Image: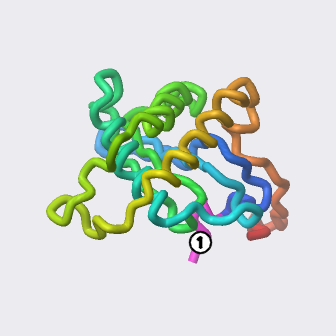
Amino acid sequence: MDLIPSFSVDHTAIIPGIFTSRVDTVGNSLVTTYDVRLTRPNKEPAIDVAAMHSLEHIIATFLRNDPEWKDEIIYWGPMGCLTGFYLILKGNRRPQDICDLLLNAFRSVENAQDVPGATPKNCGHYLMHNLGMAKWYAARFADYLAANSEKSEIFEYPKTERLVTEDGQHFFDS
């Protein structure tokens, strides 16, 4: 079985940032999956599950209500490793082009008084939320984005040399 592209990225070198994970053609349209990485994989603890769940609800609500972007949003959801989120948008933009959108989304968490949709009718695990920790993670990431938005390394996956044999076989280090 082929290793999928997201597993061939060197996770020991990823830093927080916004990265293009993949670009796909769906029908006649392009869709882009972005890796929105809040913490350093394998170097920092995973994000608290309840905080991650709250961030998912608050930021999904923000994105799907943003007048400029709401029609472009396909998906916002957590990574299984709890180090960040996936954002899927219509089209194909550079990560730098969505930085302000994500900065505003994470900044919006600061003003949240409650978690949207955190009721038994609207959520599959409505008691598993932590708004206080969500605010902490959101502020931390927003401050990081604001301080580093001019640095290309927060928008480009780390590059590593991959061994390729004469017959074209690729070797990955993950």
Residue 171 visible within the image: no
State the image coordinates of residue 9 (x, y, percent, origin top left). 69, 58
Residue 121 drawn above or below residue 103: below
Q: Left or right: 125 with respect to 56?
A: left
- The structure residue drawn at horizontal position 61% and vertical position 41%, both measured from the top left corner, is 141
Percent coordinates x, y for residue 18 in the rendering: 60, 40
Q: Which residue is drawn at 54% across and 64% down?
A: 48
Name the residue nearer the viewer: 77 or 104: 104
Which residue is identified by label 1? 2
Q: Is residue 167 left or right of residue 69?
A: right
What is the residue that sits farthest to the left in this orientation?
121
User: Residue 29's spot in the image, x, y percent?
Assistant: 34, 37
Place residue 128 in its image quadrant. Answer: bottom left
Find the residue positioned furthest to the bottom. Answer: 1
Looking at the image, which is closer to me, 171 or 153? 153
Color scheme of the displayed model? rainbow
Q: Quadrant of the C terminus?
A: bottom right
SS state under label 1: loop
Q: Magenta segment, which residues?
A: 1-7
Task: Give the total of numbered labels.
Answer: 1
Please tell me which residue is depicted at 33% across the width and 50% down the height of the picture. 115
